[in-house]
Amino acid sequence: PAVARMDVSLRLIGDSYCPYDASAYGGVSFFARGSGNIYFRVATSYTMPTGQGGLGVCAPICYDHHSVSTTLTDDWRQYTYRWSEFTQNGYGGWQGPIVPAALLEFQWEVTQDNATTPFDIWVDDVGLYR
């Protein structure tokens, strides 16, 4: 399948990786519009390799980030997810609930069977909520 992804990094301070502690929040919210299905993924220190801010606990297979799936519409809509709604695919070296105290990235991913199928995605007002 063809994959397109947009990332928002929460982890870089200069050249150093520093996870963001969002444990005081209940989840994440954003506005989006577009076409097709997307995966909203949250990368943490537990699912990233050591060279990208990870703790090394996912080795030898990393990147099994916690995610939710949704279908975008043509109109702007608010999407709000509690940490407990995020799940993993089950292939990574570390399996467990999302760890909000160790956030590294938010990712919006479009996966399609055909690389020539057009898609559209707009994201705005990303935030954490209590």
Image (cartoon, rainbow, N blue to C red):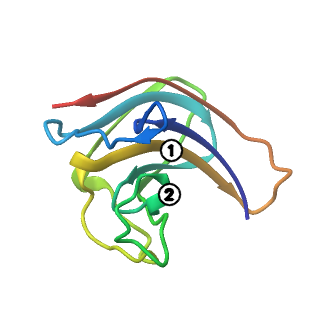
Q: Which circle marks residue 51 in the picture?
A: 2
Residue that label 1 marks: 107
Instruction: Residue at 17%, 36% (x, y): give it.
Output: 25
Disc 2 is placed on an element classified as helix
Q: Which residue lies furthest to the right in this view?
A: 116
Instruction: Residue at 28%, 54% (x, y): give it.
Output: 85
Q: Where is residue 18 in the image (x, y as percent from the top left)?
A: 35, 41
Q: Where is residue 89 in the image (x, y as percent from the top left)?
A: 44, 71
Q: Position of residue 53 (x, y in %)?
A: 42, 52
Q: What residue type is disc 1 on?
A: Gln
Q: Quadrant of the N terminus?
A: bottom right
Distance from the alpha carbon under mark 2 to that under mark 1: 18 Å
> Is residue 14 visible in this depiction of the protein?
yes
Instruction: Residue at 82%, 55% (x, y): give it.
Output: 115
Q: What residue type is disc 2 on?
A: Gly
Disc 1 is placed on an element classified as strand
Q: Which of marks 2 and 1 is nearer the N terminus?
A: 2
> Is residue 78 visible in this depiction of the protein?
no
